[in-house]
Amino acid sequence: MTPKVAIIGAGFGGLCMAIRLERAGIGSYTVFEKAGDLGGTWRDNGYPGAGCDIPSHLYSYSFEKYASWTRRYPGQPEILKYLHHCADKYGVRRKIRFATEITAADFDGSRWHLTTEGGRSEAFDVVVMGVGQLNRPRLPDIPGMREFEGTSFHSARWNHEHDLTGGRVAVIGNGSSAAQFVPHVAERAERLELFQRTPNWVIPKPDATFAPAARLAFRYLPGLQRAYREWIFRYAENTLYPALAQGWSRELLRKRALAHLHAQVADPSLRAKLTPGYPAGCKRVIIDSAFYPALCRPNVDVVTDRIVRITPKGVRTAESSYEVDTIIYATGFRSTEFLAPMRVTGRGGRDLAEQWADGAEAYLGISAPNFPNLFLLYGPNTNLGHNSIVFMIECQVNHIMACLPHLSRGGRLEVRPEVMAAWRARLDASMARMVWGGCQSWYKTAEGRVTNNWPGPATLYRRLTARPPRRAYRQV
Ligand code: NAP
């Protein structure tokens, strides 16, 4: 008897899990999706200029290579189209229950009971969480935000009805999201004030469209597409990863970013504002070629004074006041609150949020002690600063698929506590050599524990997740 599987979330992770089950002939699964459409972060982040700074041919499933990518780096509409294509091609769309938010998952000692927002409950043998790390926008806590009389919104909830043309716009935050939409807003707005708390390291994005001949070659020469994908993957592993691990390319990354800044920003005072004072890679490096030129426009100003208040008319800093019509919060996500706001209770009524009070953790980022048959996709310590998350998701799905034969006929697998302890020690040891200690970022809890990033090469993660699960887990 195949287990009954619930998948929560229909983004890259949830869809991958569903497709793999479908391909294995296991039809006893349901995908729960809180929104009315699939796509996860690529459905939510529809701001102008949204896209991915990982090349298209790598930012896709290995089993569904796609010859139709029009650019080297995919834009959000194209990624969303790809996900729809996958859902339809593999027949998983019919298994998605849209507009159905799961608010609680409770283990009764033998099965999981999922509760929907509407109060309905359904039992499953296995639960796979595919809710992502960057799914809940984080608004800052600045006094007076509610008093603002203009229009305001978060970058991941873009207000497409609101016309920015000719208006005065404040953008708070300067991470990867802001870097992508600021050039578009700067072209339309009369004035744009970018409020920067900490500068970021930026390297160029060598984007280009694929000529029709190249696309034809990718279509008819699958070996070419495989080789191209492998080349991008190896480059990320062998050049970018060592920079994050403070290895041979660390200085190269810093110099490349500084050269980019010097090439694109002529004004020395602006350059000084944009020069970070922490190691490159500590926060997510921005890969973009249009951000700096936008900041050099005469209608754009980079404000580095501390914001003290949002007023009815705009933004007040320690030094000055700025009247604006629109405030765009590009302030990131509640990245360390994994699975929130869902309540998850495991064996013996154990609450997962309580178990994770000092920071989320899971063996391979996939399984937590006391929570049998509960698996996470893109869970704790599986984010990358150098390579494709889709690769990591596929490794996780491979691991879960390897667990499934042990879960038929009422089997319940739980990671052994001693395996989890060894995993934690291994992570701590590897974390010590990574660059992330030198600044605050969305990779860390407020207390400074890195809960989001994987501190090794992606190939190591593939090897570890490929191990047979028998030794790490016990039947409960
Ligand atoms: P983010 O990187 O977390 O950036 C948030 C920004 O808001 C930072 O500049 C932060 O400043 C600022 N901020 C937060 N609270 C503030 C406050 N109270 N006052 C002033 N400034 C404040 O968020 P994001 O840009 O949305 O990007 C999140 C992640 O999404 C990225 O790192 C990346 O992994 C992913 N992403 C990827 C792509 C891609 O192309 N692959 C594109 C977009 C996003 P501090 O730095 O000082 O904290």
Image (spheres, rainbow, N blue to C red):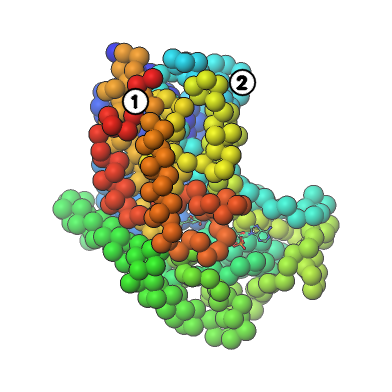
Label 1 sits on a secondary structure element that is strand
Which quarter of the frame holds ligand 1? bottom right
Residue 65 versus residue 208 in the image, above or below: above
Q: Which residue is mark 1?
A: 474
Which label sits on residue 118? Answer: 2
Residue drawn at x 58%, y 39% is 357
Would residue 284 appear left or right of 232 to someone viewing this image? right
Tell me if the residue at label 2 has its CB under 8 Å from ligand 1: no
Residue flagged by tag 2: what amino acid is it? Gly
Quadrant in which residue 273 is drawn: bottom right
* Mark 2 Cα shell of 10 Å, populated few (<14), some (14-19), many (≥20): few
Queried on whether the Cβ of the residue with tag 1 lies below 8 angstroms from ligand 1, the answer reads no
How far separated are the C-alphas under marks 1 and 2?
35 Å
Rendering coords of residue 163 (x, y %)? 66, 56
> The N terminus appears in which quarter of the rendering?
top left
Q: Nearer the viewer, residue 122 or 343?
A: 343
